[in-house]
Amino acid sequence: MASAAFSRRGFLGIATAGLTAATRGFAGDDPRPPVTDPRATDGDDRFEPNWDERLTLTVGPDAAKADLAGRDDKVIQAALMHVARLGGGTVKLLPGVYALRSAVVLPSRVRLLGSGADSIITKIPSRMVTLSEDSDWYDREITLSDPKGFNVGDGIVLRAANAHNNSPVIIKRTIVAKSGNRFKLDSGLRENLWLAGKPTCSAMFPLLTSERTADVVIENLTLDGDKANNEHLDGNYAGCIFLQDCNRFTFRAVEARNYNGDGISFQICHDVIVENCHSHDNADLGVHPGSGSQRPLIRGNKLERNGIGLFWCWGVRYGLAEKNRIDGNHNYGVSIGHNDTDNVIRDNEIRDSGKVGILFRDESRGKDFWPNRNRVESNVVTNSGGVDGFAIDVQGKTHDVVIAGNTLRESRGTKRGTGVRIAADARSITLRENRFEGFAVDVVDQSKGLAFHKA
């Protein structure tokens, strides 16, 4: 049942990395002696020995081979909660297709280990029905016009228009009880679902999700959102993976595909590592470091045929995206914008972006919301947009950006497009040692009124 190989070299080596870093910093800026020989002390969750073995549970469709037999969200959730109750450990998914009716919720200090392409987590097709009765913001139940296909334990999304200002209302809940067409939810609505707003209920949810947890590792797993049979759901609410307010998550060798929304999305999550993953053919964003996320590390991934490959949301700072292959994304290869500052984008290969290879968005709604103090270094950006496309487009009043040592290339025949465009109000944009190939114009610097080929 337990495996030292899984727990020591896998989960513990990664999940304690943040604690090890904290230990190293302890002596440097604290007068107390450094902790060099930690012991397990009740209530002390900062320093702990690196144990040789923790519990590993296997999950799979064959009861003869797995500790827990099944192929749905319930058995995966049960295994995760069991190892979490014992202080952490590994759940290994054996080969099989696991079809979910609700999201798998990740507790702290666990490792979810798949069997690569042979272990696939997917979901049931979504079904949307209307609500037949009003529900107020303090209610914890809804009434459906047609309850068929909705079961206790199902994850759902409730959507409506706000009856006062017509703004969208989106609520994620789980069904916990039912009588006829009345369904009790796991928590209160906290929004009005009045018939005037045309409320609906859909069988939609992220495949893996977590909120206010830490020190989790997901490895060697395939996630398929069954885009053809599911409605669209915005990446601020879901994706193959969706995190909210989490710390120190690591995704390694995860394939996130075919979600009608984002592949991997995390909002206000810090020190997230996305490494050697493959996020492809998702309707919206391949990897979405969401609002307020600090220090993301996005390295060695393949981000292909999404709406946008890598999308830095709002206030993402001190992140690094390197050595990724970002190919064939329908709009932008990389998009960076609102208060996304002090990040490095380097050594990436960005090809065949539908509009722009690397976009610095115009964020004009505040005093200084632009993506400032970022570095774009040693990337290869090839064949961006149509005849009027841009390899790199610096919009708005963006300032203090360094674009250095990149190869910007157009290889689709006659000279076309622009290598770098700098907006009229941008300032302190440093271009240094970049190589331009095949463009109609290498640089358009509207801040200086110039359009020219680099020598």
Image (cartoon, grey):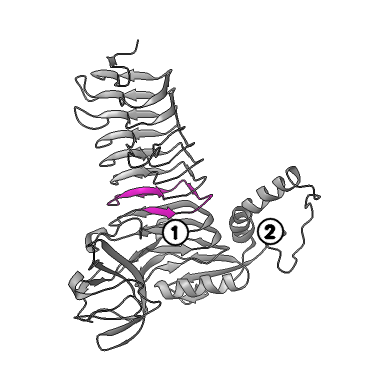
Give percent across and percent down for residue 331: 26, 40
Q: Which mark is residue 425?
A: none
Q: Is residue 100 above or below residue 338?
A: below
Q: Is residue 192 magenta?
A: no
Find residue 119 and report its horizontal and vertical position in percent.
41, 62
Q: Are marks 1 and 2 in contact (CB under 8 Å)?
A: no
Q: Say which of 323 and 331 sits in front.
A: 331
Which quarter of the rendered picture does the N terminus lie within?
bottom right
Q: Which residue is mark 2?
A: 46
Residue visible at 36% across and 53% down in the picture: 263
Q: Quadrant of the C terminus?
A: top left
Examine the rendered structure and indicate whether residue 356 appears above or below residue 202.
above
- For image coordinates 49% across by 42% down, the residue present is 317
Residue nearest the observer in this picture, 340 or 107: 340
Depicted 48 relative to depicted 152: above or below: above
**151 up-or-down from 87: above or below:** below
Magenta-span inclusion, residue 269:
yes
Q: Is residue 388 left or right of residue 270?
A: left
Q: Categorize mark 1 by other alpha carbons within 10 Å: few (<14), some (14-19), many (20+).
A: many
The answer for how far apart the CA atoms under marks 1 and 2 are is 23 Å
Q: Earlier in the sequence, mark 1 or mark 2?
A: 2
From this viewpoint, is residue 372 visible?
Answer: yes
- On the question of residue 352 being in view, the answer is no
Which labelled disc corresponds to residue 243? 1
Q: Is residue 103 left or right of residue 260?
A: right
Name the residue at 36% across, 72% down. Answer: 190
Q: Residue furthest bottom?
A: 179
- Residue 194 in the image: x percent, y percent? 23, 75
Amino acid under disc 1? Leu
Secondary structure of residue under mark 2: loop
What amino acid is found at the position of numbered circle 2 in the picture?
A: Arg
Magenta-highlighted residues: 263-290
